Image: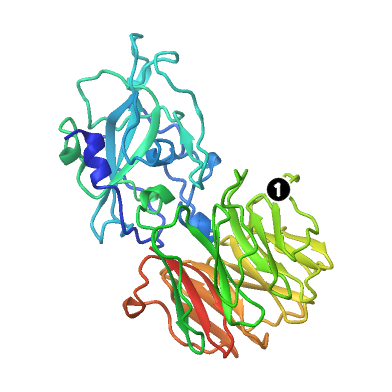
Amino acid sequence: MSIAEKLVEVASAGLARRSSRRGFLMRSAVVGSALAVNPFKFALKPGTAYASLCGPDASCSSGWTVFCCSINNGANSCPPGSIPAGWWKTDQSNFCDGGPRYILDCNATCGTCGCGGGGICGPGCYNCGCHCGSGSCDQRLVCCNQFRYGQCHQELACVGPVVCRVASCRPPWELDATCTTASATANATALHTAPCLDDNRAAFVSPFGGAPKLGAPKGLLRAPLVGIAATPSGRGYWLVASDGGVFSFGDARFHGSTGGMRLNRPIVGMASTRSGRGYWLVASDGGIFSFGSARFHGSTGNRRLNRPIVGMARTPSGSGYWLVASDGGIFCFGDAKFYGSTGNVRLARPIVGMTPTTTGKGYWLVASDGGIFSFGDATFHGSTARRQLAHPIVGMAHTRTGKGYWLLGSDGGVYNFGDARFFGGLGRAHGARGNAVGIAAALGGGYWIESQR
């Protein structure tokens, strides 16, 4: 069996995404040149529900290399023109049921040119060019990093740049006989991932309190879920995926989607109209897509943003909406008013969502550490910013009275403040394993939690 066949066979499934402390440790027998990027850079930025499916450092500017499945038609294996040239492991990820996770570098093969410095062949010897990944949230580098760990294919004096990375729960020497057991550990990459590494995208919506059980999409989804929006009555909800696919349950009605469109950027959230007869979808560049009775009031799709958009909320009248970026920058459209932002504040963790007050004269922003920022008539009821969270916060929802709110952790843990009552969180009893994605308030004081495996 070839390495490609073996890696496809063991493509990482059932990935559980958990937070980790910063760390980077290299041990024994690392061969070749120094990293082309700073290996000690590791910022835990889970960001939005969509971004959490790629883990931290998923942008092109992060300096890390893309996963092979993001550029190799979904295959978790080295693409043509590349070979495994080295590997490392992580011990702090839980992607492999508590065991080590192995990452193999697929380096470009050299042509007939001679070797350059550090075991990397010179430019023009390999058939790839440095560029950014695209097509998913995994927009890391392709064929850019001039680096070789060196435990695989040591018979080759030199290889080209790292084209992409393969993830496996099996040791590399079981996948490719040329790989040695000389170990290197890089826990800085413990949370790095990509949607294509999770080949089991089963969706769940778990009801708590007075929330009715309404269901979730059946089968495996083409794109990861990124949000849930309750209908104005609280008797139904919509789920939205990163490709703009929309799924309706309860008294929610389907009014259209971008599932069949080619998007410049992924969808990151949605909001319903006041009547529930329409909704807006928002992309990470702030592009707005209106369906049903939803009217277009403007977007940031043609602006250069400092940080990506991570969510949106409509005004009580339904004649406007706010967009929020990961730095807490607020963009107002229609009758939405500006009450403040964290755009000029140095944040400990990025903003991951917002929710308006019932009057529409204020709003709360929530960061991935559960820090709450209140503006306008929004009252601060508490936060998790001073707690040592095992899992990042991915969203929030306010009670129907507007006098409290829930925060949702990526593991499905729920934190309640103000008049928000705790009705439970995700657990095995609900059959929902994997990532919690969003939370929405239901009629009767309960809530729904959206998750995906």
Residue type at tag 1: Leu
Task: Please indicate whether residue 401 sits to the left or right of residue 160 in the image.
Answer: right
Q: Do we see residue 45 in this rendering?
A: no
Can you give x and y, in whole percent of width and height, for residue 282 in the image?
66, 57
Which corner quadrant of the image does residue 248 belong to?
bottom right
Which corner quadrant of the image does residue 28 belong to?
top left
Quadrant where the C terminus is found in the figure: bottom left
At numbered mark 1, what does the secondary structure look like: helix, strand or loop?
loop
Q: Is residue 231 above or below residue 99?
A: below
- Residue receiving disc 1: 305
Foreground pick, 212 / 19 = 212
Residue at x 39% of width, y 61% of height = 219
Quadrant where the N terminus is found in the figure: top left
Foreground pick, 30 / 61 = 61
Foreground pick, 35 / 324 = 324
Q: Do we see residue 178 in this rendering?
A: yes
Q: Is residue 47 above or below residue 445?
A: above
Can you give x and y, in whole percent of width and height, for residue 366 in the image?
61, 69
Can you give x and y, in whole percent of width and height, for residue 13 in the image?
30, 55
Q: How is the image coloured?
A: rainbow
Can you give x and y, in whole percent of width and height, for residue 351 in the image?
61, 63
Task: Please indicate whether residue 51 sits to the left or right of residue 165 in the image.
Answer: right
Foreground pick, 367 / 348 = 367
